[in-house]
Image: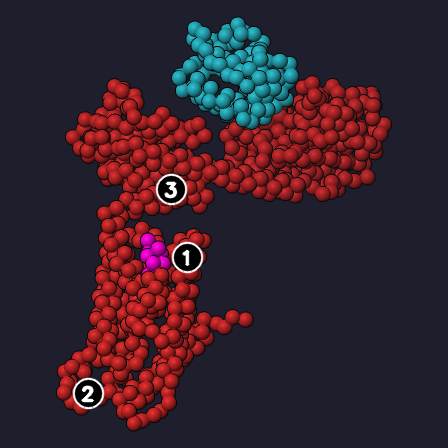
Chain colours: A cyan, B red
Amino acid sequence: MQISSVLEDDNYVIAIDGDVDASSSIMLDEAISKAIEKGQQQILIDCVDLNYISSAGLGVFMSYIEELKVRNTRMVLFGLSEKVENVFKVLGLDQLLSIEETKDQAKQQAHG
Amino acid sequence: MMPSTTAIIRLTTASGILCWLGLALVDLMIGFELRNANVKLGVPQFLSTLLLTGYILSLYFHYKQRLVSADNLNFIELLWRVFVTGLIATIVSVFIHFFLSFLVSGSKLAQDGLTLSLLYHVNIGLILAFVISTFLVWKKLVLYQKTKSLLRTWQVFEYAILISLLFHFVPHNRFDLPFSLIFAFILAMGLVITPNLKWVAFLNFKQKWKSILLILLILLYLTYFMVYLTGQQGNELLISDLTNHVSVIAIYAFIMLYAVASLLVTLFNLPTTSVFEQKLEEVVNFQRLSQSGQTGQNQEEIYDLLLESSMSATFASAAWFEVNHQNENQHLIVKNITPEKVQTVRPVITNSSEKKSRRQGISSSVNSRVDNIKHPNYKSVLVYPLEAQNEKIGTMVLLKEVSDGFNNDVVNIVDTFGNQAAVSIENHRLMQSAIENERYREELKIAKRVHESLLPSELESNQHFSITAFSKPADEVGGDYYDTHRISEDKFALIIGDVSGKGTSAAFNMSQMKGVFHSLAQIDLDPREFLVKANEALGRCLEKTSFITLSYYIIDTGKKTICFSRAGHCPSLYYDSSISKLDFLKSKGLGLGIIRNQEYCKYVELNQIKYQSGDILVMYTDGITEAMNPDGEEFGYDRLREVVVNQVNQSAVEIQRAIINGLLQFTEVDDIEDDFTTMILKFS
């Protein structure tokens, strides 16, 4: 799995490429925690190339829900495949995380 | 069987004493005969020679055996033995001398042939004992680190001496031709043997001084005895004249020769001793370094050993070792220098290294860099980067107060030490990882056993439904959990869940889940309340990134209802026989532990359906829907539904079998790596 973080205007975009399993979830965790540390207010997670996410990966997203709320930071996921989105939905994370189809929608959501 | 050492020592002691007593008696008698022409005792001269030979041989075997039993003595202890034997012999001899010359001088006793002869025999008995014992100790020294040819030469030497003993039975004069020839031959062999002085090299400085002193004293005794024996030479009445005994003279000459040679060699070796000791220490240090990886020493101790060894090899006055840590903070090990001072030296070294990266004259195979530096305390420096498995572990810096302090030889030695330390560190790491692996596997084994013991062996049911469950454990420990609880006659609680994570933590969380289930199910909560309470309980003990998904059902066979709530778990399949429809039970839900406060209740809902005979409830874990085929395709919800659709008229067990078979066919493997679980209920 590969992770790249880019700042686009005031949107901090973390792009995930590949599978997020138990070992690669650590990288994802680091990337998100770095973004939060930097004080980014809008964090976009690019899931276009996210193929599979394990419960460890879901655990990473879940563990930041509380912190994001406290810091008033918006995190929006976008470009999820149907399969991956279903994983989020089954677990109920779609109720807590913003999930959008496209990047533009995500940006809007992040600033809305 | 060989007689034991002590037996031989006793035997030779006895034979020695007997021979000596016999010799003294026979010589007295012969002397008496000589002095008194009218007396004829008829004691043959031959008997005296025989007893003397017997005495010499007894001494030889006696001391040989005693040295065998003292095999582990070092050189100094051996010399000490010779010295003590000589000391006793000399003291007794000197005492006899004074006794004769002062105490009883002029008296009749001093003139008495009998007394003189007896005292003379005491003297030669002691001298022979000293000479023979010294000879045998010298043998041990000569044969130290022996070669085959040396051993053969020595054997010839000993046999020559043995044969020369026979010569004494033939009438002869001192230094007549045959006597001289035999003496010359044995002495020549002795000369050949004498240069074998390897033992001297193995003495340290202090031991060399000791041995010089001991050998000097031994030589003193030997000279004293020589003077004594030549003084007695003219006295025909004493019969057994040792100076007329070619073997004794030859041995005497040899031990003196070897003593003088040892003395000189030891003396000349004194100045180079420190070099030899240094080399020896290097070898020992090298060995310690190479063993340090295995003996469970930690890396710190290896660095310490490397520092110490390198310092003693190079005579460096100060040194330090910087450990490169992945997590920025550097760790320092210092010797003869304070960490503060290290800070003052470090920039000086970096400066000089920028000017010239590598000095001439150091071979390129060597990692070390040597340089002169400008520092108030230190003038030259040796920098050695320690690497293991292509990873830079740290840097060793050795400092000297003089410029050009590190020559090529010491640089090579430091390199050797460094390489060995690297090997030791590698060994150490391999060992650590092996231990950790083993520990992890042990943990997994335990976790697996815990996991298996947490699953129920029997499921609760009554005549209104049949229930079956199957759970395939993962190679690693997974977190699938299912269970049932009979709340009352008609009321049953069913649970299926999945704890996130694997291994011991999953098994641990699962056991908490089981505890929560069995305590809350008793209180007869509705499924939504159950989830809210379970979330509250588990939220306190789950790790930050862990969560649990589950579905909770209450079957009431009295009211024919199913109540359920879903906490993020994959939705169950339900077959409604009245409309012949198989579908997933839709319900809002959220995994346990995702929100750990009162808000959780907002995200779960309570559902209730009425069932009738023939209805089927298929519960499962995501191990089934996420199982992949070789193309990376997941089994998915649709395929699962497909399999069950064709089995709605079958029993719960049949449906279960169909699901497992379908799954195995799809994944095309004999054994699915992940864990998966099904629990199927069919109403009758």
Considering depth in this image, is B93 or B642 the residue closer to the camera?
B93
Name the dominant secondary structure of the magenta segment.
helix
- On residue B286, the disc is 3
Q: Amino acid at mark 2?
A: Gln
List x then y, in percent, for residue B157.
39, 61
State the SS at label 3. Answer: helix
The residue that label 1 is drawn on is B153
Crowd class of label 1 (few under 14; some 14 to 19; many from 20; radius 10 Å)? some
Sequence-earlier tag: 3 or 2: 2
Residue in the image at 47% along x and 8% along y:
A111
- On residue B111, the disc is 2
Q: Are marks 2 and 1 in contact (CB under 8 Å)?
A: no
Location of residue B528 with respect to B161 vertically, above or below? above
Q: Are marks 3 and 2 in contact (CB under 8 Å)?
A: no
Q: Left or right? Give the position of B326 relative to A97.
A: left
Disc 2 to disc 1, C-alpha distance: 47 Å
Q: Chain of mark 3?
A: B
Sequence-earlier tag: 2 or 1: 2
Residue in the image at 22% along x and 62% along y:
B216
Which stretch is magenta?
B187-195
Location of residue B292 with respect to B358 vertically, above or below? below
Which one is in front in this view, the residue at disc 1 or the one at disc 3? 1
Considering depth in this image, is B640 or B290 the residue closer to the camera?
B290
Q: Amino acid at mark 1?
A: Thr
Q: Chain of mark 1?
A: B
State the SS at label 1. Answer: helix
